[in-house]
Amino acid sequence: MFIDLMRDKSKQMPAIAEPLAVERLRIWHCGYKTLVPVASYANLRALAIATFPDTTLDPLVTLEKLQDLHVLHLPKVSDLEPLTKLTCLESLEFQNSSQLGCFEKANGHCIT
């Protein structure tokens, strides 16, 4: 199942009746105060977020099946260490995330 949350002005993410059925999720420029509820989407394989509201990426660490992560604008995040727990991650893209600086990968390449 694909859930598309676009420009929702609510401060809280809506509850989804069957979160385990969701495999793809887009949260695009919504007014949510936190993305902690994303942790309940245990079968999520693809996640796209525009404007990440949290100060850490911790809300994503339980997404063990996540393969594709695209995040546009992470104004409060400065540490990518929580992503090391996402062992199935195949594709990772950040845009407009100057706070992050350099992310050191295991092979020694720097991604800015």
Image (cartoon, helix red, strand yellow):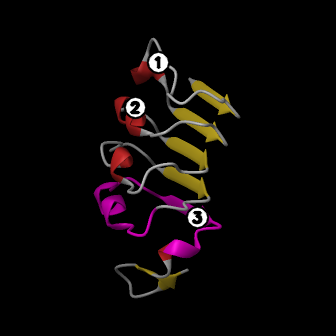
Q: Earlier in the sequence, mark 1 or mark 3?
A: 1
Mark number, residue 15: 1
Residue at position x 59%, y 46% in the image? 48
Question: The C terminus is located in which quarter?
Answer: bottom right
| Residue marked by disc 3 | 94
Where 109 sits versus 60, above or below?
A: below
Where 26 sits versus 90, above or below?
A: above
Mark number, residue 100: none
Mark number, residue 37: 2
Q: Nearer the viewer, residue 3 or 14?
A: 14
User: What range of the chain is rendered magenta?
Assistant: 77-99
Q: Counting other residues with Cα less than 10 Å from the Cα at mark 3, is it few (<14), some (14-19), or many (20 or more)?
A: some
73 sits to left or right of 42: right
Distance Cα–Cα, label 2 vs label 1? 8 Å
Indicate the secondary structure of the residue bearing disc 2: helix
* Residue 103 picture quarter: bottom left
Q: Do the numbered discs 2 and 1 sit on residues whose CB atoms are within 8 Å?
A: yes
109 sits to left or right of 58: right
Q: Residue lying farthest bottom?
A: 108
Indicate the secondary structure of the residue bearing disc 1: loop
- Nearest to the eye among marks 1 and 3: give it: 1
Q: Nearer the viewer, residue 2 or 50?
A: 50
Q: Amino acid at mark 3?
A: Phe
Where 104 sits versus 35, above or below?
A: below
